[in-house]
Amino acid sequence: MARDPFHFDYQRHLAARDLLPQHQEDFQRLVKLLSHAPGFQLFFARVADPGYRDVLIAKLGKLMALQGRPVRLADLGDERRFPDFQALEAWLEEDEQKSSLIHLINGSAWLQGSRLHSLNLRRNALAEKLEAALLWWLSVPAIEHLAQQAPDAWSWRSGVFDFVDPGAQLPSRPEEWMPAPLSLNLPQRSQRLAVLNRQLAAEFATEIPDEFRLNLLLERADLLESLGLWAEAEQGLRQEALPLAERLGDVRSKAVTMGQIADILQAHGQLDEALRIRQEEELPVYERLGDVREKAVSMAKIASMLRLRGQLDEALSLLKEEVLPAFGQLGVLREKTLTMGKIADILQARGQLDEALRIRQEEQLPVYERLGDVREKAVTMGNIADILQARGQLDEALALHEECLPIAQWLGDIEVIAFLKYSRARIRLQRGDHQRGGLPEIYADLAAAHAIGVKLRRPDYLGTIGLLLAQVMSMTGEVEEALRILDQAEAAFNQLGWTADVAAVREMREAISAQTGPG
Amino acid sequence: MTNLTYSPPSDPLEVLQKLNFDEAIGPMDPRFVDTDAARGGVGTQRSLARKFGLDLYQDKFFPNQKRHVLLFGPIGSGKSTELLRFVHTLEQGKRLFPILLNVRGEIDINNLQYADVLMALASAVVRGLTARGLEIEPARIETMRLWFQEHVATEDNIRELTGELRSEAGAELTIPFLAKLLTRLTTTFKNSSVYKDSLREVVKKTFTQFANAFNELVQAAEKALQERGTAERLLLIVDGTDKTPLTDAERLFVLESEQLLAIEALVLYTAPITLKYGGTSVSKLDTDEVLPIIKLQEREGERRYEAGWAAMREMLGKRIAPDSFTDPASIDRLIEYSGGHPRELLRLVRLACELTESDPIQPPTLEKAIDKLAADFRYWLQPEDYALLARVDADNGAHIGNDERVRQLLWRLALLQYNDGSWRHSHPVVRRLEGYRQAAAKRGL
């Protein structure tokens, strides 16, 4: 067993890195229990796709092997081998390796009749004989059936793990201007976080001088944001970093901390409060300190908020007249290129596609390639794909998105993953793939992207992705759920003040209602 | 574990390792917490003792010849812990000699029948006597010997099982031999479905004789206790019968209650809370006793019940070090969402330890843990359930009957009841679910 908690955390994060982001939390929770919970345990795992289940089983197998713990698997669908519960019980008992984990698969048919009856009868005897965890992989309907119709068997569970629900919680991070975490992929960030957690734990806390501690707290908040743990990041900033910065009288660190809080608020659509922080608590400090770079970053973020509010001219003017010259003067290539990207965003929103495309292809992509900034390269390629799509070059656009997605998944950057999946679904709809059997893939992409929006509480995601997801749901007949998603989308657009989009939601709602008719 | 060496774990992984929901905590265990005041009643021990004619404070003892009492309570509310304490208290006096049988460890609690329970109980009585070095003259348990020789040893289907014991039974039945015999038979009930059925049949077909033999054993044991000056009566305590599937519990305590009542002894059984409102009222068992969960507020909901909060804080503090949380307010947050149910509190702690990516645990992680616990209810709660729960809350815990739906909600902890069942409220985590919120909104909550 990985006794060293640091090593254990590292392995957990490493194993979870290429799972769907919304499943990472439950996967890591499951690994913790498999490694640390005592004695017999029965876990249910909710999974829709057998292929994905097998990926998860393989990952768990590797982790358990690292700990020297044997794993077995029983395919309950094999009627010859497991004709009844007695056969399964005998198989479980004949385990010479003393397995720590036993997977049960294809057992939906076991949740009724004599097998369920036997399971209920023998469960305690089984629990006494086995020192292992039974992990029973079940489909969504099977889990629901179990929970509702078989309370005895259900009450026996030690935990339920969800590898389906698109509403599960997902991670991401706000707009990125600092290069530090960009160079780290997901396992590396997880590893660094584990180190920081250890250093900042109470037992070592007194050994760290306050000013170092403050830096570590800010770095941790950054990492937490990058792992999607925004609430934890905000908590740490408000309750630990901010008081410490105030106590130290460190106005710059205080401004940086407030800036990070504003990042989170901005991503959650709380634009007024975020704007107030930028204008009142960040900009004046950086001006006073003569910190041109941080001042320019703050102004760039203000421009982003103006763009989100639809104030495109003001945003463009701020970027061109204040931010770009400042970065140019400082000679910071990455920040200058990011600013060009923001300018291209606005041009694209205005329909100036040629100029936007030129910036992306000539001023952004080559720089990110040279800098080795894979995240921004992927985002830029996605933006280029959007322009191609707007021009009707759908196949080329789709190919670009397909190219970017594995990069984003490797980075574990779910904000980008959501963006790419949404864009891919949009193109497929536009190509009419849904009329040629492609609806399930489109649905899956949108559901996953929407789930990220839910997790991030990002109103722009909830609105834009939700609008399209509702449309697809209405195609599959899920009218009630579609209307619920539309309600969310409308609230999100209202929060952003995007009135045209609010109107689009209402139109969609009327269309869906008309399609289903009264009652 | 002793008080001198014990300190609660603070590392979340260590907490996970040490949390075992099925473990009952005895009164000498440093993790034990006195919850009498917290539950808002007169005290479990006092109340239980009085059922058997014993006033613990005045040491007055006027028992009935026989009394069969059911102790109800939600699973995980602390019944086993209370029983361990009760046993410890009784052992300090000379009135009742407690024999505690946890059927969970002795027999298979699924598909439990009276034959299994009584056989295990007889075995526990003999073990209890042996442990105290008490001897019984063979003549006093002659009926047991006859029953074994005439009915068990001669039964074709279990000859193989009893083979080596038949010759030993001989003309006299000694306590050591009886201990061996009953252990063998009880183990059979636990491990062998083939012999179990045959043995049950024997007990059922010859129940009058078996009951006589059992009663003779109890009388002989009580006589031996009295002669030694150890105690005046036996108290047989059966724990774990609350954890059987509901249909089994119903069969045992409703349909087969006559067989249980044939035992002339003082007996206390644990029973699932659902049964209190579903059938036992028509049986002749004593069905008054309910172990309520811990009260966190008065019924009106405005005033906190401080004794409840204090006990829950102490309970939590003995399972996880307070500095395991970044924010001291986290402790009360967990307690609030446990609804005063001890095991739900431990489940929340466990979820928080599973979910945390930091040490100490931060408040957002607690919120996730609360959501996870709530999600567990979402798998099975139906719109009608939410409507009913919202109705209970809207009416300030008012009684809304005990139909099948209410009983299921109580059994599965979506509905929690306080103060001996006089009022109820929905589980606090359920109130975070959308289904509940919608139902509550319709009621103007």
Image (cartoon, coloured by chain):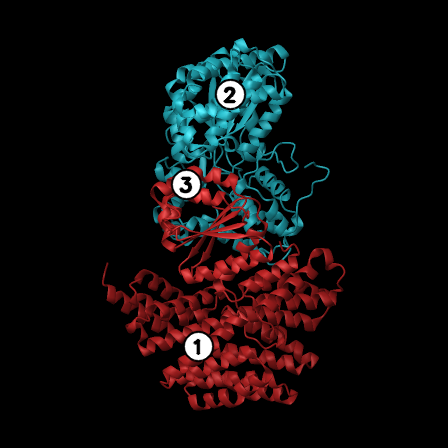
Amino acid under disc 2: Leu
What colour do you see for chain B?
cyan
**Residue B117 versus residue A242: which sits nearer the camera?**
B117
User: Which residue is rendered at x = 51% and y = 67% of the image?
Assistant: A18
One can see residue A146 in this view: yes
- Answer with left or right where residue A269 lies relative to residue A113: right
Q: Position of residue A99 (x, y in %)?
A: 54, 49
Q: Which residue is mark 1?
A: A402
Q: CA distance from mark 2 to mark 3?
A: 29 Å
Q: Which mark is residue B165?
A: 2
Could you tell me which chain the residue with mark 1 belongs to?
Answer: A
Q: Which residue is more in the foreground, B113 or B198? A: B198
Q: Which residue bears the numbered disc 3? A: A86
Instruction: Count neighbours of disc 2 (C-alpha within 10 A) and say few if under 14, some if 14 to 19, many if 20 or more.
Output: some
Tell me the distance, in whole angstroms, between the alpha carbons under discs 2 and 1.
75 Å
The image quadrant of residue A469 is: bottom left
Assess whether mark 3 and mark 1 are in contact (beta carbons under 8 angstroms).
no
- In this rendering, the answer to whether A309 lies above or below B125 is below
- Tag in front: 2 or 1: 2
